[in-house]
Image (cartoon, rainbow, N blue to C red):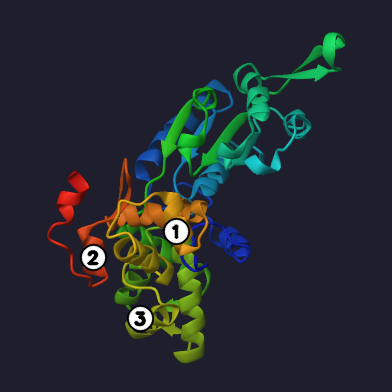
């Protein structure tokens, strides 16, 4: 059900685009102003003490710039960055290999850190706190622990599901920052910068605003939509993006003015028509939509909540009055009584 255009997760086609358009400094990185200010202080203080920067946890939906921030921190600290992900570290030996190959001051970036298994987490605790690696050699009564010293490094973890990170692991990060969805002016600046890098001609501010407004307040989605509109303009409008070509391209992609695709609208319609507006549990909703629960929770739900089209209650998900209005469905007068019973 999920479309790839507004999916905030990185797709194979995004790898080149992300690396090409990725900001290289805090000045190029638009939005997240408070986080940038805090990181600048953190980095400057660490550099004055000639120390590695504290371990950092970056939280927020996919596509908001967590990996980009890790690269910028690495550059500001003049450090090398090693990149891996929670699912890629399957055994203690995998983690040991990564940690023992780090140099002093290196940054280890672990994406989807909430997907580390418990054994890996427990091995990571002393590495983060005391910069030592405990390796158990042998089994049973003859087993012994070998302790290896590690260089002082910085772990930057990224997660879309903060609640799935265990308290002991979360508590070992010196700084935690939550990235929010972007404001319209910042997204417009991101689209304008990307268009300049890609040599795309946008000759009307209205076109810029249309693309930004449809981007789900997410830079990765904004860049992907810009790419699709560029393709359309090259075929149908001599490579020039204006208000008309932007609207026509988005109409062909079935993306509305809020950045919702058929998959998003179908999810809302399912809650309204099949479940009488809700509340409905995630499992039941996923089964009805023939969609994975993780896709609903990670891709659709965060933005629908941000728009105010969806609400989560102890009893399940409900479609709000705004969702009814957006879909041109009459809002039942007595529905509020059902939610408060």
Closer to the chain start, of discs 2 and 3, is 3
Residue that numbered label 3 is attached to: 247
Quarter of the picture containing the C terminus is top left
Residue neighbourhood size for the residue with mark 2, other residues' Cα within 10 Å, grouped as few (<14), some (14–19), many (≥20):
some
Under tag 3, what secondary structure? helix
Q: Quadrant of residue 268?
A: bottom left
The residue closer to the viewer here, 112 or 285, is 285
Q: What numbered label is drawn on residue 202?
A: none
Under tag 2, what secondary structure? helix
Q: What distance separates the C-alpha of mark 1 from that of mark 2?
A: 28 Å
Q: What distance separates the C-alpha of mark 2 from that of mark 3?
A: 24 Å
* Residue 9 rendering spot, x and y as whole percentages: 53, 56
Residue at the left extreme of this rendering = 333
- Relative placement, left or right, of 111 versus 201 is right
Closer to the chain start, of discs 3 and 1, is 1
Closer to the chain start, of discs 1 and 2, is 1
Residue 83 visible in this rendered orientation of the protein: no
The residue closer to the viewer here, 63 or 138, is 138
Which mark lies nearer to you, 1 or 2? 2
* Residue 59 rendering spot, x and y as whole percentages: 46, 40
Residue that numbered label 1 is attached to: 219
Q: Quadrant of residue 178?
A: top left
Number of labels in the image equals 3
The residue closer to the viewer here, 237 or 146, is 146
Q: What numbered label is drawn on residue 324?
A: 2
């Amino acid at each position: 059900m999920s479309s790839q255009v507004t999916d905030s997760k990185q797709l194979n086609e995004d790898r080149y685009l992300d690396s090409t358009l990725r900001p290289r400094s805090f000045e190029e990185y638009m939005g997240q102003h408070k986080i940038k200010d805090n990181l600048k202080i953190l980095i400057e203080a660490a550099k004055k003490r000639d120390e590695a920067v504290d371990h950092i946890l970056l939280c927020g939906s996919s596509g908001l710039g967590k990996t980009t921030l890790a690269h910028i921190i690495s550059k500001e600290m003049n450090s090398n960055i090693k990149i891996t992900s929670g699912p890629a570290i399957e055994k203690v030996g995998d983690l040991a290999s990564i940690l023992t190959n780090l140099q002093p001051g290196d940054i280890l970036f672990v994406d989807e850190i909430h997907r580390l298994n418990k054994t890996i987490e427990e091995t990571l605790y002393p590495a983060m706190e005391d910069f030592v690696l405990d390796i158990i050699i042998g089994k049973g009564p003859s087993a012994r622990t070998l302790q290896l010293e590690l260089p002082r490094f910085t772990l930057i973890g990224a997660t879309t599901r903060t609640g799935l990170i265990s308290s002991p692991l979360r508590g070992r990060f010196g700084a935690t920052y939550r990235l929010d969805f972007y404001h319209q002016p910042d997204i417009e600046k991101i689209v304008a910068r990307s268009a300049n890098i890609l040599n795309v001609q946008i000759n009307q501010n209205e076109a810029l605003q249309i693309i930004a407004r449809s981007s789900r307040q997410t830079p990765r989605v904004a860049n992907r939509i810009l790419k699709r509109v560029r393709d359309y303009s090259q075929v149908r409008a001599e490579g020039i993006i204006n208000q008309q070509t932007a609207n026509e391209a988005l109409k062909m992609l079935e993306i509305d003015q809020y950045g919702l695709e058929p998959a998003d609208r179908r999810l809302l319609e399912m809650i309204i028509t099949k479940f009488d507006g809700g509340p409905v549990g995630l499992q039941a909703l996923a089964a009805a939509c023939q969609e994975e629960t993780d896709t609903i929770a990670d891709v659709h739900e965060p933005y629908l909540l941000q728009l105010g089209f969806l609400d989560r209650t102890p009893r399940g998900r409900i479609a709000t009055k705004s969702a009814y209005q957006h879909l041109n469905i009459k809002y039942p007068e007595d529905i509020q009584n059902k939610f408060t019973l």
